[in-house]
Image (cartoon, rainbow, N blue to C red):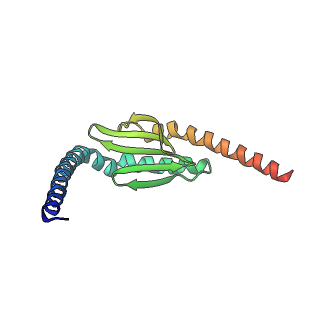
Amino acid sequence: MSFLDNLENNLKALESRDMGGIADHGSREEERTRARAEAPWAERLKRDPWTQQLMQQMTRAGFQRRTKVNLIWIGTTLRMEARGHKLELRPGANGVAAVYLRGLEESKRETVDFKEDPKQLVARWMPVIEAQKKHDEEEAARVAAEVAE
C-alpha cells in the first residue's frame, strides 16, 4: 500500500468519525432537552405522597389476591409487575403516563392524575392480573389432570 493510499484511508476514517461525532452531539443535545422537560414530572413522581399511597395499595391489592406485585424503580420510571403484566409510570414532558404492558407489547396508555385516588389506578389494573391468575390456575389444573392420567 502506498503512502498516498494510506493517507487517503486515514482521511476517510477521520471524516466518518467527525460526521458521527456531529450526529452523536445532536442526539446528546436532544436527550438533555428531553430530560430537562421530564425532570419536574420525574421529581413529582418520586416525591409525591400519591406515589407512596399507590405502592401501598398496589401491594395490598396483590396480597389480597395472593399475587406478588413487584415494585421497581428503573431510572425515573416506576414499574409494577405481576404475572407477566406490567404497569409503568413514565414521566414525560407533559406529565406522567401510565403504560399497561403484556410482555413487551403495550396494550393501553393513559395520563396519570395526581389528584385522583391511587385506588382507581389499582382498580383499573387488577382485573388484568385476576384474569391472568385465573388462566394460570386453569392451565395448572389441566396439566395436573394430564399427568394424573
Percent across and percent down for residue 93 are 26, 40
x and y percentages locating residue 19 in the rendered image: 17, 50
Residue at the (16%, 64%) spot, across then down: 2
Residue 61 placement, left or right of 47:
right
Residue 6, compared with residue 148, is above or below; it is below
User: So how many labels did they put on this image?
Assistant: 0
Q: Nearer the viewer, residue 117 or 32?
A: 32
Q: For the view shown, which residue lies furthest in the front direction?
A: 2
Give the x, y percent position of residue 114. Answer: 35, 39
- Where 132 falls versus 73 (above or below)? above
Quarter of the image where one finds residue 134: top right
The residue lying at 32 percent from left, 44 percent from top is: 91
Q: Is residue 111 left or right of residue 65?
A: left
Name which residue lies at 23% across and 44% down.
34
Q: Quadrant of the N terminus?
A: bottom left
Residue 35 left/right relative to 62 = left
Where does the image place residue 24, in percent across and percent down from the top left?
21, 51
Q: Is residue 137 left or right of residue 73?
A: right
16 relative to 104, above or below:
below
The residue positioned farthest toward the right in the image shown: 149
Front residue of 113 and 91: 91
